[in-house]
Every structure is written in C-alpha cells, then in structure tokens.
Image (tube, coloured by chain):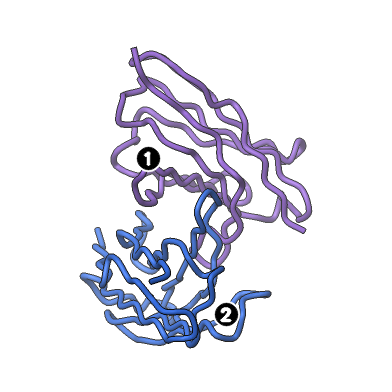
Amino acid sequence: DVVMTQSPLSLPVTPGQAASISCRSSQSLVDSDGNTYLSWFQQRPGQSPRRLIYKVSNRDSGVPARFSASGSVTDFTLIISRVEAEDVGVYYCMQGSQWPPITFGPGTKVDIK
Amino acid sequence: QVQLVESGGGVVQPGRSLRLSCAASGFTFSRSAMHWVRQAPGKGLEWVTFISYDGNHKYYADSVKGRFTISRDNSKNTLYLQMNSLRPEDTALYYCARGYDHTPESWGQGTLVTVSS
C-alpha cells in the first residue's frame, strides 16, 4: 500500500501570512493513464471533509484562489497564500493512483497563532 | 447540488451487525461510483470500500475485508454498507462519498457507529 506522509503535523499561522503543507508518497503517484490522482481535503472543526484540490493542482468549484497546490511523482505541496480565520482545520492529502486502497495522509492541523 | 445523507449508525455490541444507508440526491446516482470512508474519534480518515456505478466492481480495505459488504440500489438512489462481526476498532464516523477520478469527491455528514459492550 502507498503510505502518505505530511509535514508539519501542526501549523500555527498568523492571519494574512502564507502556509505551506508538504505531502509525500512512498511510491510514484503517476497512474498508468498518465494522470496523478493526488487530492487535498480540508476538514473544518465539526464538519465533513471537503475536497479542495484534485489531480495535484486543480481547484474544486468554489475553492478560494488563495489555495494552490503543486508537485509531481512523490512530492506535493498545498499552499494557502494568505491565511484567513475560516481556514482553521485539518488538511489531508490523499492518493487514488495506486489503489485499492485509497490512502490518506495523517493530516496537518492548521490553527491561528 | 449533491446531497448525501447517511443513516443507520448506533451503539452495537462486539460481534453484532449493523447496516448503514446513504440516500443520494442532486446528481445521477446510477452513473456515479461511491465510497465509504470512516474516521475514528479524534483520528484521521480511513478509506473503507468502493463500488462502481453499476455495482459490478467492489473493493475493500484489508481491515474490513470479509466482514463488510458494500451494495447499492440504483432504483432507490441509495448506497448501503452491511457491517458484520463488528469490533471495537470499527468505532467511527462513517461517511459516504460520491466517487470521481479515483477520489471521494463529495461527502455526506456521516453516521456514528460505536462498537462497545
């Protein structure tokens, strides 16, 4: 199974500052169809997960432009350019390239300093 | 818009069974793959199982293989998860999610399953 790791696991941020979360996979996430099925999810306190990013860098509908993502093969990054209070929560990366099983990272908790 | 409403959770003793349901609306259910994903209290996300749009393909996490069964009724726009031989480690909030491009795309609010004597 593909193991997903994230760093840091906890990220205190100052509103208006940038935040960066790293995600690494234990195997290449380039699928046989040429796509890389790496997604990012946000889970606000008390809410269900919400997908923010799919296939490495594509923002879902309604996701603010301050969220961006990049990466390739085994190394991926989510960036929040200017953190707002509503961005508090846990962020998960997830791979769907080498599946089953689909696997998630352990999560990065973002909170306000 | 996509709406997924899970039900059927509750408190159950170890070794017993429970069936979860997920009512779907706002999209063409019969053309959509579906997933179940769970989250133990205070823990991260764990993928549980997948079913293709027509029910012909099903995959399971090793932790539930042989105990859980995913199914669907496209005439009722409903997804199911039959959980047998439940263990305390199955205690979690269970989410159903629409699948697209190998990803649980849109999620319900979840239903809580507690396995305890």
x, y percent for residue B1: 77, 59
Q: Are marks 2 and 1 on the same chain?
A: no
The residue labelled by disc 1 is: B40
Outermost residue on the left side: it is: A26
* Placement of A24 over or under B12, stated as above or below: below
Q: CA distance from mark 2 to mark 1?
A: 28 Å
What residue is rendered at 51% in x and 22% in y? B10
Q: Colour of chain A?
A: blue
* Placement of B76 over or under A64, stated as above or below: above
x, y percent for residue A25: 26, 71
x, y percent for residue A102: 38, 57
In the displayed structure image, the side of residue A113 where residue A64 appears, left or right: right
What residue is rendered at 36% in x and 51% in y? B44
Observer-nearest of A2 and B58: A2
Q: Amino acid at mark 2?
A: Arg
Q: Disc 2 is attached to a residue of which chain?
A: A
The residue labelled by disc 2 is: A59
* Placement of A36 over or under B57, stated as above or below: below
Observer-nearest of A5 and A99: A5
- At label 2, counting other C-alpha atoms closer than 10 Å, the crowd grade (few under 14, some 14-19, many 20 or more) is some
What residue is rendered at 48% in x and 87% in y? A81
Observer-nearest of B78 and A75: A75
- At label 1, counting other C-alpha atoms closer than 10 Å, the crowd grade (few under 14, some 14-19, many 20 or more) is some
What residue is rendered at 60% in x and 45% in y? B109
x, y percent for residue A56: 44, 80
Q: Colour of chain B?
A: purple
Query: Number of labelled discs?
Result: 2
Q: Disc 1 is attached to a residue of which chain?
A: B
In the displayed structure image, the side of residue A17 where residue B108 appears, left or right: right
